[in-house]
Amino acid sequence: MSVPAHSRTLIVTGGNLGAWALDRLSDYTTLIGADRGAEFIARHGYRMRVAVGDFDSIADGQLQAIRDAADEVISFDAIDKDWSDTELAFREAVNRGLRDIDMIGALGTRFDHSLANVHLLKQAQELGCSLRLIDDHNEISLCEHTVRLTVDSRYPYVSLLPLTEAVTGITLQGFLYPLNDATIRIGQSIGISNVLDQPSGTVTIASGLLLVIRSRD
């Protein structure tokens, strides 16, 4: 299938969702629902391209509402599946040629699921996709070369954490606490809680994969 130019995709999955999430739904050309995220989309009157999941925590009436709100529903057995509902939705998006993807509901009270979803950033990078995880307090992306950031009052703090064993050649411009050709290794916290002190700034690295976490208290 063809993908519209400048198509932006939002995957809504079943972690923390609320009014902040509802405000985001109209910003995207394509919505994909993962399990309870699909129910969230349907309940608030939006239409999704596809709903994906085992739907084991969805009541019959809710499942019918999902079917009514989705162009397509792909169901998986709750036991006989290899991937989480969120990863299944991500893989479905990629299989459909979608490459500019945000996720909401990917962070929540289950830290194992949250961390697995953060690890999806590496899979996205390997597949040539842009992926961000967003919630009311965080926006998480991955830097493999250079990332340009602009001041955003919603997320004033910028933290940098390695996703590989070490990230080398880290150079920051436009930040209150600059770095020049620095190395950060897993387990080190030197990259926590920086802030932009210019309208925009850049993060540049020489090797490795660096998590860029924009956040607020």
Image: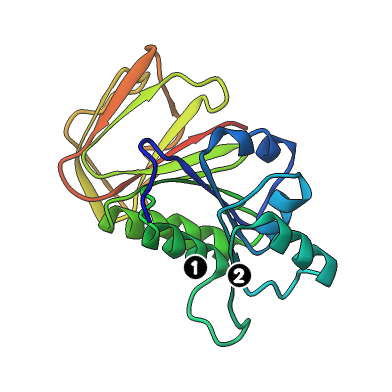
Q: Position of residue 114 (x, y in %)?
A: 55, 58
Element type where label 2 sits in the image: strand
**Rendering coords of residue 21 (x, y %):** 66, 40
Picture disc at residue 127: none
**Type of amino acid at the residue the image marks with label 1:** Leu
Q: For mark 2, what is the residue?
A: 53
Between 52 and 16, the one nearer to me in the picture: 52
- Identify the residue shown where x is 62% and y is 32%: 217
Work out how far the residue at label 1 is from the one at label 2, CA to CA, in angstroms: 7 Å
Question: On the picture, is 208 further left or further right than 150?
Answer: left
Q: Residue furthest top?
A: 198
Mark 1 and mark 2 residues within 8 Å of each other at the beta carbon: yes
Q: Residue at x 49, y 74 (%)?
A: 83
Q: Position of residue 144 (x, y in %)?
A: 24, 44
- In-image side of 97 versus 215 (left or right): left
Q: Earlier in the sequence, mark 1 or mark 2?
A: 2
Q: Percent position (x, y) of residue 196?
A: 40, 19
Q: Which amino acid type corresponds to the residue marked 2 in the rendered image?
A: Gly
Residue, disc 1 = 88
Mark 1 element type: helix
